[in-house]
Every structure is written in structure tokens, then in C-alpha cells.
Amino acid sequence: MDMDEQNKATNGKQFRRQFLKTFMELHRVTFPIWGSLVTLVVLLGVVFSLVEKISVFEGIYHSFITALTIGYGDISPHTRSGMILSVFIGIIGMVATGIIVALAIQAVRISYESVHGKDLTITGEPENKGTEERNF
């Protein structure tokens, strides 16, 4: 293994460690949001069990399977209220997924900058030369 390969391997290990550390740190900061979302999923699962007349365990199970967007289909709503609750639980799941993705992207950016000492940017020529730059 030459020196360049050793440096790449070392940078990879540093990056993974930094990523996990940063991701957990960001997760800790957003824990109040996570705690609220999980509590809401559990409470809606209990309400779902009452509306659909199933056990509380099955209601909470359905709630988490729906929020995680797995959707096995073994428990499904049979009432309009249950259907509305399921849609709301699914929306909560999408918000939770968005938070996870945002935390991971932020952790990658911070970790890259920490390990490589430079910004993580995408470079390239704009497709429409001569036009003003667009900020999104």
C-alpha cells in the first residue's frame, strides 16, 4: 500500500468517525422534536386502536408501521376516522424522514469540512452562460 492509499484510508476512517459523532450531536440537539414526534405517533396509535376497536398494541404497531412508511397491510383502517388518522400518521412519518435526511446531509457537510479542511461544494460550469446566477 503506497502513501496515497494510506492517506485515503486514514481520511475515510476519520470521516466516518467524524460523521457519526456529528450525526449523534445533531440528533441530540433535535431530540425535543424527535421526542414530540414519537410521543405523537404513540398517542395516535392509542386513538387508532379505540377508533378501530383493536388492541392498543395493534394500534401502536399500526401507527409505527405507517409512520415508518413500511405499510405491511396486516392492519388497515376500516372507518373514515381511522383512515384520516392513518394519513396524519403518515405525514408525521414523512416529517421524521425529512429530519433524518437533513441531519445526515448536515453531518456529511460538517464532517467533510473537518477532515479535508475545505468546503464541500459542487463545482461545474452553469448550463446557461451569461445569465445571472440563480440562488435556490
Image (tube, rainbow, N blue to C red):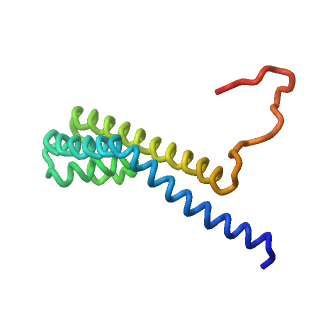
- Residue 44 point in image, percent of width and height: 23, 41
Residue toward you, 13 or 51 = 13
Q: Position of residue 12 (x, y in %)?
A: 65, 65
Q: How many marks?
A: 0
The residue depicted at 61 percent of the width and 47 percent of the height is: 109
Q: Quadrant of residue 51?
A: top left
Residue sitting farthest toward the bottom: 1
Left or right: where 91 falls relative to 121: left
Q: Which residue occupies 63% across, 53% down?
A: 114
Q: Quadrant of the N terminus?
A: bottom right
- Up the image or down, 114 lies above or below 46; here it is below
40 over 1 or under it: above or below: above
Depicted 100 relative to depicted 13: above or below: above
Task: Give how far across and how far down residue 97 sits, in percent.
Answer: 44, 45
Residue 2 in which image quadrant: bottom right
Q: Is residue 59 left or right of residue 116?
A: left
Q: Quadrant of residue 49?
A: top left
Report the residue at 51% width, 43% height from top: 102
